[in-house]
Image: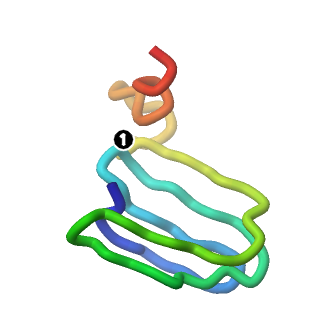
Amino acid sequence: GVQDVDSFDEASVLLVTDLGYITLHGIDLHISKLNLEDGQLVVEGEIIGVEYSDQEGLGGRSGGFFKKLFK
């Protein structure tokens, strides 16, 4: 469900997805494949953290990805 890559460097990648924003934190990160038509992304490197925020922010009413995942 990747719609766009908002920003990226060797330490972080900020993704816009169908259900919100995902930030990958890591070391020596590289985007090796990006296909926005299929919503696919491959990131290589050492991922040390993942942050998620729904489209309305952390306190939004929609609940976002994790609320829907753990229903």
Q: Quadrant of residue 4?
A: bottom left
Decide which of 34, 11 is in the foreground and name it: 34
Decide which of 7, 58 is in the foreground and name it: 7
- 71 horizontally vs 9: left or right: left
Decide which of 51, 57 is in the foreground and name it: 51
What crowding class fits label 1: few (fewer than 14 Cα within 10 Å), some (14-19), or many (20 or more)? Answer: few
Classify mark 1: helix, strand or loop. loop
Q: Position of residue 25 (x, y in %)?
A: 70, 66
Q: Is residue 2 above or below residue 65?
A: below
Point 39% across, 48% down: residue: 20
Quadrant holding the C terminus: top left
Q: Is residue 46 above or below residue 31?
A: above
Q: Position of residue 46 (x, y in %)?
A: 77, 71
Point 46% across, 24% down: residue: 67
Q: Quadrant of residue 19?
A: top left
In the current view of this chain or complex, which residue is farthest to the top?
71
Q: Quadrant of residue 28?
A: bottom right
Decide which of 49, 59 is in the foreground and name it: 49
- 27 horizontally vs 10: left or right: right
* Amino acid marked by disc 1: Glu
